[in-house]
Image (cartoon, grey):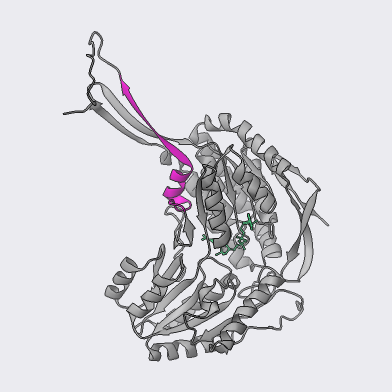
Amino acid sequence: MSIIGHLIDGEVFVEGTRSQDVFNPSTGAVSKSVDLASQVTVENAIASAEQAFPAWRDTPPIKRARIMFKFKALLEEKAEYICQLIGEEHGKISHDAAGELQRGIENVEFACGIPELLKGEYSKNVGPNIDSWSEFQPLGVVTGITPFNFPAMVPMWMFPLAIACGNTFILKPSERDPSSTLYIAQLLQEAGLPKGVLNVVNGDKEAVDTLLSDDRIKAVSFVGSTPIAEYIYKTASANGKRCQALGGAKNHAIVMPDADMDNTVNQLLGAAFGSSGERCMALSVAVAVGDAAADTLVEKLKSAMTSLKVGAFCDSKNDFGPVITREHEQKVVGYINSAEENGARVVVDGRNPNVEGYQAGFFVGATLLDNVTADMDSYKAEIFGPVLQIVRAQSMEEAMALINDHEYGNGTCIFTRDGEAARYFSDRIQVGMVGINVPLPVPVAYHSFGGWKRSLFGDLHAYGPDGVRFYTKRKTITQRWPSAGVREGVSFSMPTMK
Ligand code: NAD
C-alpha cells in the first residue's frame, strides 16, 4: 500500500514511525496510508524553511511572480489528475473538484500580481528635505493548517500568497485526504521554487503542536472546525505568533414571500447538497418568512429532490458524493434522528441510501427537515452533511434575529425581489459574507474571505488584500538628505510641521 510522506527541503520523505489509514469514502476501503510526522520531522521542516528564508526574501518579487505563473500553468495542465486525487480521498464528484481547483488557481493568479501588491506607500516632503515611505516586509517562516473539505483550494488560499510575499512556508494538510495537497506542492517545486521555501508535513496534533510552540514560526493560518480554531488561536497568540483561525459555520438563507421560488429552490439545492454539504459555506438552514412561503418552498424542494443523485466520485452524473468517514456518516444520521425525535418533520429522508455497487461507501442522501426550531441540536450544530433544515418565521426581523443570535457568522443569503429588504439585511446582519440572491457568497480571490463571531478568530480575513497584510509586516522609513551646507539645529521638542 502506498504511503503518503512529507515534502521537506525539496524531497519527499517518509519517517515510518506512526501512520494513519486514508480511505476512499466512495468504496469505504482503505486506499493508502499517511505518515504522521513526529516533532523531529516537523523541526527539520522548520529548519529547512528558515535556511531558505534569507535568499527567498531577497528574491525580486517579479521573479517570485514568474514561478507563480509557471505554477498556474502546471496546475491547469494536471487538473484532471488533481481532481482524481481529490475524488479518491475526499469523495467529491469531478465537476465539484474542478470548481474547487479553479478557485485555488484564482488565488495563484492573485499572487502573480505580487510586484504591484507590495509596492507600498510613499510621501515626498513630509518635512524639509524629508521623504517617508512604508514598505511591506515578509515575516519569515509561516505555517498553514488546513481541513479535509477543500484539500486543494484552502491550502492555496494560504501558501501561494505567503510565498509570493517573500515568506517561507510549512503546510500541514488534513491527514484524511492529503494526496492532492502534496502533489500540488510538488508542482510548485517543479515550477522552480527553491527547495525549503515550501515544506509539507503530514500529521496530526503532534505536528500541529510542534508548529504552534516553535519560536521560528512567525504566523499561523488555520482553517477547520471551531473548537480547534479557538485552540489554535489561543495557543499561537500566547506563543507570540500572528494568527488567523477560521472555524465552522451554520449558514442561513432567508426566503422572503416575494422570492422567485423556482429559482430559490434551484439555488438552495446546489448550496445545501453540493459536496454533500461539507462546505463551510453550505446553506444548511432556510428560514422561510410566512407559512405560505414555507409551504410552497417545502413542496417545491421535495419534488426537486426526487431527482438528486448521490453516488461515487467517479461518475460525473452524480450530484454529490459520500461524506468523509464512517464516523461522520453516523454523526450526520444522528442529527437527523435527534431532530425527528424532537418534533421536526422528515420530508425527504436520506438515511441509508441505496448506492448500487457502493454499499460500503459512506453515503447519506439528500435530506429535508421541516419545522426545525432553534432549540434543536440539529439547528445549533454544524452538521456538515447533506441536510437542509427549514425553520419557519413570521417576519424578516424574526428571521434575522435567528441568524444574529447563532454562534456562527460565516455566510448568509437572502432571496427576495425587494431591494430595500435586501439592503436592510446586508447592512444589519451579523455575518461576514452576505449573498443577495447568491447562495454561496464566497469572495473572489481579489477580495478576502472570513466570517464573524465564532467562525473566525483573529482580525484579518484569508487571502486577497487581507492576505497580503497578514503575511507581511509594515515598516515605515523616514529619510532626510539635507541640502549641502545646511546645518540642522538642535531641537528638544517633538518634531512637527507647524
Ligand atoms: P478539523 O478542525 O478537524 O481539522 C482541521 C485541521 O486541524 C487538520 O489539519 C487537523 O489535522 C488539525 N487538527 C485536528 N484536531 C486537532 C487538535 N486536537 N489539535 C491540533 N490540530 C488538530 O476540521 P475538518 O474536519 O478537517 O474540517 C471541517 C471543518 O472545517 C468544518 O467545521 C468546516 O466548517 C471548517 N471549515 C471552515 C472554513 C472557513 O473558511 N471558515 C473552510 C473550510 C472548512
Residue 87, percent from left and from top: 67, 64
Q: For this view, does 159 lie left or right of residue 312?
A: left
Residue depicted at 43% across the width and 70% down the height: 412
Q: Is residue 449 left or right of residue 16?
A: left
Residue sitting at the far left: 498
- Whether residue 264 appears in magenta in the rendering, the answer is no
Q: Residue at x 46, y 52 (%)?
A: 458
Does residue 470 show up magenta in the picture? Answer: yes
Q: Is residue 482 left or right of residue 469?
A: left
Residue 104: % across, % down: 55, 55
Seen from the viewer's position, the closer of residues 141 and 306 is: 141
> Going 64% across and 79% down the picture, which residue do you hit?
333
- Please name the residue shown 67% across and 53% down the image: 205
Judge whether 138 appears above or below 290 on screen.
above
Residue 354 horizontal/vertical position (percent):
71, 83
- Residue 432 occupies quadrant: bottom left
Decide: is 298 above or below 309. below
Q: Quadrant of the C terminus?
A: top left
Residue stretch in magenta: 458-480
Number of marks drawn: 0
In what quadrant does ligand 1 lie?
A: bottom right
